[in-house]
């Protein structure tokens, strides 16, 4: 009899453990993102391919190098790092401050000044302030972007919903009081969203296929509730690789990187002159001139940062362009001596140049050696064809072939 009781108790414990495991597994609706690859650019942070970490300052074109002491990072948000262990932490005086969490998928900040919430692995939104308590959600929140009381939410079933909290005056027996109300509107249930950005009534959605959509929420929420079709997102750009924003106290700049390496600005119409494409009476799409072959972009407090194919790092913008436009840097400017591929920044040499002398870095010596090789008539032989199509096999054909070889070498070395 005792043996049967022991076996029964053991079986009960096993079933309990299995049940708990199933429940625990079911709660993990959001996987923690994998570690980032280097070079990595996010907001005002650059981590080079060899693991050096820099904080960028677009106000004066300077940068500060600090030791990267946090392992396995998978994101950087408003000065805080997230890791593949679900942690969120920051570096203070060379030491790691860990907030003691293990379920952080993505932190979300209400503005540029304060910490706010985070999307957790269990599909809920939780408070990043003590004691990291549950705020809202039904275990189905996959992503979140918000600017104060406006929220753009992506759910695990693919729905994208705009949510707004507001207060209305209500008459009570003791006088006039206020009650909190919530307005919810379905933006889309068919867009396969890669990135969502809420910018105070302007809701941007980048699809996995590279289409950038915009939904403009009517300022009169009662009108929006009566006419939900007004919220239907419209495609405004195609072949988009990345979209970023960093709302300031004065403006809401959005920067777009396209597959062809060009960068675009979506902002208020006072921004610039010339080649603009109005979205409405407030916003336009404006190309950023003076920079091309861009592979990555980021933005922080109104300043924009970019990495080009050759590893050079650039900046432009300003924190208060509307009130002080004279301090807004429209022309992209290069950070002197900084390169995303490593400590030894490459000088101004042709972008198709490779490590010709095979010394591990690209310098002006490679440019000189490439010119000698390409211009040398002794390297022209019968095996070379009329590459440039001028009817003769000359040193120009050798130069063209060398150019192709060097470009292939460059792209293999720095794109992979």
Image (cartoon, rainbow, N blue to C red):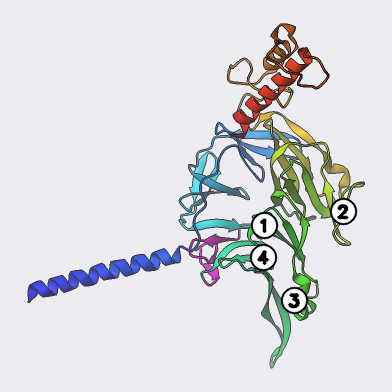
In the depicted view, which residue is nearer to us: 79 or 85?
85
| SS at circle 1 | strand
Q: Which residue is mark 4?
A: 152
Quadrant containing the C terminus is top right
Closer to the chain start, of discs 4 and 2, is 4
In three-dimensional space, the C-alpha distance between marks 4 and 2, rounded to whole angstroms, equals 25 Å
Residue 207: which numbered mark, if any?
1
Q: Nearer the viewer, residue 6 or 181?
A: 6
Comparing marks 1 and 3, which lies closer to the viewer?
A: 1
Q: Considering only order in the chain, which callout, 1 or 2, is on the residue closer to the N terminus?
A: 1
Position of residue 263 measured from the top left corner of the image (x, y, whole percent)? 77, 44
Where residue 163 appears, as percent x and y from the top left, is: 67, 71
The mark closer to the camera, 2 or 1, is 1
Which element is circle 4 on? strand
Is residue 164 among what the camera can see?
no
Disc 3 marks which residue? 228
Asked if the residues shown at circle 4 and circle 3 are in contact, with their CB atoms under 8 angstroms apart, the answer is no
Residue at label 2?
277
Which quarter of the picture shows residue 346?
Answer: top right
Between discs 2 and 3, the one toward the N terminus: 3
Across and down, in percent, residue 220 comes to 80, 75
Instruction: Mark 2: give few (<14), some (14-19) or many (20+) Cα within 10 Å.
Output: some
Residue 295 position by quadrant: top right
Residue at 72% across / 27% down in the picture?
351
Residue 280 higher or lower than 171, as above or below: above
Viewer-nearest of discs 4 and 2: 2
Viewer-side label of 4, 3: 3
Return the residue found at the far right.
274
Q: CA distance from mark 1 to mark 3?
A: 21 Å
Q: Residues within 10 Å of mark 3 (few under 14, many from 20)?
A: some
């Amino acid at each position: 009899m005792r043996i049967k009781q022991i076996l029964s108790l053991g079986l009960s414990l096993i079933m309990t453990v299995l049940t708990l495991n199933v429940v625990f597994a079911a709660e993990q609706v959001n996987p923690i993102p994998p570690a980032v690859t280097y070079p990595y650019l996010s907001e005002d942070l650059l981590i080079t391919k060899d693991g050096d970490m820099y904080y960028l300052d677009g106000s004066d074109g300077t940068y500060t190098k600090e030791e990267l002491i946090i392992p396995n990072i998978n994101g950087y948000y408003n000065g805080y790092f997230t890791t593949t262990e679900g942690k969120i932490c920051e570096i203070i005086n060379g030491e790691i401050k860990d907030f003691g969490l293990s379920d952080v998928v993505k932190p979300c900040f209400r503005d540029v000044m304060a910490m706010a919430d985070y999307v957790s692995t269990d599909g809920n939104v939780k408070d990043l302030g003590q004691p990291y308590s549950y705020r809202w959600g039904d275990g189905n929140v996959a992503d979140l972007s918000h600017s104060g009381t406006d929220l753009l939410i992506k759910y695990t079933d693919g729905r994208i919903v705009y949510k707004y909290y507001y207060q209305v005056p209500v008459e009570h027996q003791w006088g006039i009081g206020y009650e909190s109300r919530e307005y919810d509107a379905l933006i889309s249930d068919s867009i396969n969203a890669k990135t969502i950005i809420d910018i105070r009534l302007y809701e941007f959605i980048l699809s996995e296929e590279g289409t950038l959509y915009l939904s403009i929420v009517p300022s009169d929420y009662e009108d929006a509730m009566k006419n939900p079709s007004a919220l239907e997102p419209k495609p405004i750009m195609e072949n988009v690789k990345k979209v970023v924003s960093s709302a300031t106290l004065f403006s809401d700049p959005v920067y777009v990187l396209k597959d062809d390496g060009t960068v675009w600005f979506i902002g208020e119409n006072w921004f610039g002159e010339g080649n603009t494409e109005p979205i409405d009476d407030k916003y336009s799409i404006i190309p950023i001139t003076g920079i091309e072959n861009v592979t990555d972009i980021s933005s922080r407090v109104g300043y924009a940062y970019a990495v080009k194919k050759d590893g050079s790092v650039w900046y432009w913008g300003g924190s208060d362009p509307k009130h002080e436009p004279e301090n807004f840097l429209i022309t992209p400017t290069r950070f002197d001596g900084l390169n995303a591929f490593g400590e030894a920044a490459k000088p101004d040499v042709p972008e198709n140049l490779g490590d010709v002398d095979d010394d591990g870095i690209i310098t002006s010596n490679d440019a000189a050696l490439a010119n000698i090789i390409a211009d040398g008539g002794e390297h022209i032989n019968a095996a070379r064809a009329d590459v440039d199509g001028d009817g003769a096999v000359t040193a120009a054909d050798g130069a063209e072939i060398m150019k192709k070889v060097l470009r292939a070498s460059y792209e293999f070395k720095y794109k992979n």
